[in-house]
Image: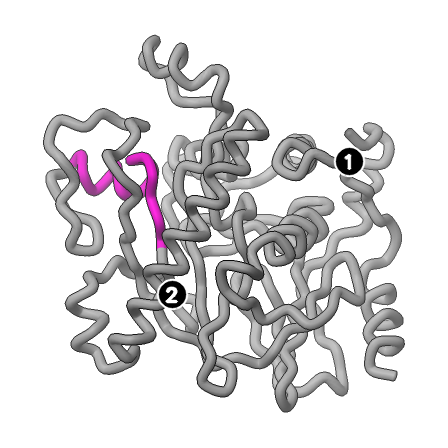
């Protein structure tokens, strides 16, 4: 774990929005700034924290944590499906193939939690999937289930959609859709087994896919805290037995705090104190080290200047 002084210094090393020149067309996602030119896409992972499809604050070192986890997982899953990564020229940057995005996210759930539980509690289906009757919050499902959603590209909300809707939309060929389902379930199985070895439970996660010259690839991020839920395995049964929520590694505690403040994506964002931002940063770093079994090496200083310099070296 990094020192308290380094953690606090991270408040002066925040990477928020980038405006880098000479890298091609720019697109800003919730967390990543993307630059597209020819066959390459440069993905700059910021320190922005997104909840309920809205950016709510910035967290020290968050971008480095996400980029590091993604890089590790892409290297460990190439035997399942090829990914878009070409190079990692900076702790916050990934250079990838410029894939044509498949406009649907593959959300795989092994437990019922989060938005799926909130819908289930109201008697509603998720993505056309009817979960078994009598489930309790945080309960393990009989088998992993895919609940797809749209991929919002305009800053709006992702929406749960059924497989029937996706296939009838004409936006994905059936053969590609079947490949996506097979890959998503295989990736989830790999992630679940690795998490179990680390004393963790991979609750649910999302995968995004793209096509590069007609070939399906997994893109964006994989098995990070922003796209996945993780719980501590050793305390799971005891806490559930007491009617408590599992011990969480992901950003669900932040979502729950926002809900307690009356915020679910609409209206003014509640204020995040620096103390709370540092607490969240510690949470991300601790989770990184638990997930990967290695120490997190924080890089301090002006991230914008560092990224510009490293990308100039890469471009040469």
Q: Is residue 269 left or right of residue 161?
A: right
Residue 300 in sight in this render: yes
Read off the residue under disc 2. 156
Read off the residue under disc 1. 295
Q: Are marks 2 and 1 in contact (CB under 8 Å)?
A: no
Q: Residues within 10 Å of mark 1 (few under 14, many from 20)?
A: few
C-alpha gap between disc 2 and disc 1: 36 Å
Res. 298 image quadrant: top right
Q: How many numbered markers are drawn?
A: 2
Res. 182 image quadrant: bottom left
Where the C terminus falls, by quadrant? bottom right
Residue 133: horizontal and vertical position, in percent? 10, 32
Residue 124 on the magenta segment: no
Range drawn in magenta: 107-121
Q: Secondary structure at mark 2?
A: loop
Q: Is residue 180 left or right of residue 93?
A: left
152 and 195: which one is in front? 195
Please report whichever mark, 2 or 1, sits nearer to the chain's N-terminal start: 2
Query: What residue sits 42% from the left and 33% below the top?
Result: 256
Q: Secondary structure at mark 1?
A: loop
Query: What residue sits 56% from the left and 47% below the top?
Result: 224
Residue 120 on the magenta segment: yes
Query: What residue sits 63% from the left and 78% below the top?
Result: 41
Res. 70 image quadrant: bottom right
């Amino acid at each position: 774990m990094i020192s308290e002084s380094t953690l606090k210094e991270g408040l002066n090393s925040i990477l928020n929005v980038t405006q880098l020149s000479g890298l091609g067309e720019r697109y800003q996602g919730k967390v990543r700034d993307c630059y597209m030119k020819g066959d390459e896409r440069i993905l700059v992972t910021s320190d922005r924290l997104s909840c309920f499809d809205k950016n709510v604050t910035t967290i020290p070192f968050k971008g480095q944590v996400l980029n590091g986890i993604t890089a590790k997982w892409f290297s460990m899953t190439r035997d399942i499906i090829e990914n878009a990564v070409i190079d990692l020229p900076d702790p916050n940057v990934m250079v990838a193939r410029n894939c044509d995005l498949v406009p649907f996210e593959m959300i795989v759930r092994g437990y019922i939690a989060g938005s799926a539980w909130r819908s289930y509690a109201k008697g509603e289906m998720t993505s056309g999937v009817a979960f078994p009757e009598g489930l309790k919050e945080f309960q393990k499902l009989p088998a992993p289930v895919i609940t797809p959603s749209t991929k919002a590209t305009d800053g709006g909300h992702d929406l749960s959609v059924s497989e029937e809707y996706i296939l009838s939309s004409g936006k994905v060929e059936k053969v590609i859709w079947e490949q996506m389902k097979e890959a998503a379930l295989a990736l989830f199985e790999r992630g679940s087994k690795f998490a179990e070895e680390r004393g963790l439970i991979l609750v649910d996660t999302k995968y995004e896919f793209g096509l590069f010259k007609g070939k399906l690839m997994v893109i964006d991020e994989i098995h990070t805290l922003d796209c996945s839920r993780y719980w501590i395995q050793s305390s799971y049964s005891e806490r559930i037995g007491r009617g408590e929520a599992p011990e969480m590694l992901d950003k669900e505690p932040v979502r729950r705090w926002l809900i307690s403040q009356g915020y679910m994506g609409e209206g003014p964002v509640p204020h995040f104190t620096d103390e709370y931002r540092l607490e969240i940063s510690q949470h991300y770093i601790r989770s990184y080290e638990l997930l990967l079994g290695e120490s997190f090496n924080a890089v301090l200083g002006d991230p914008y200047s560092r990224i510009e310099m490293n990308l100039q070296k890469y471009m040469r």
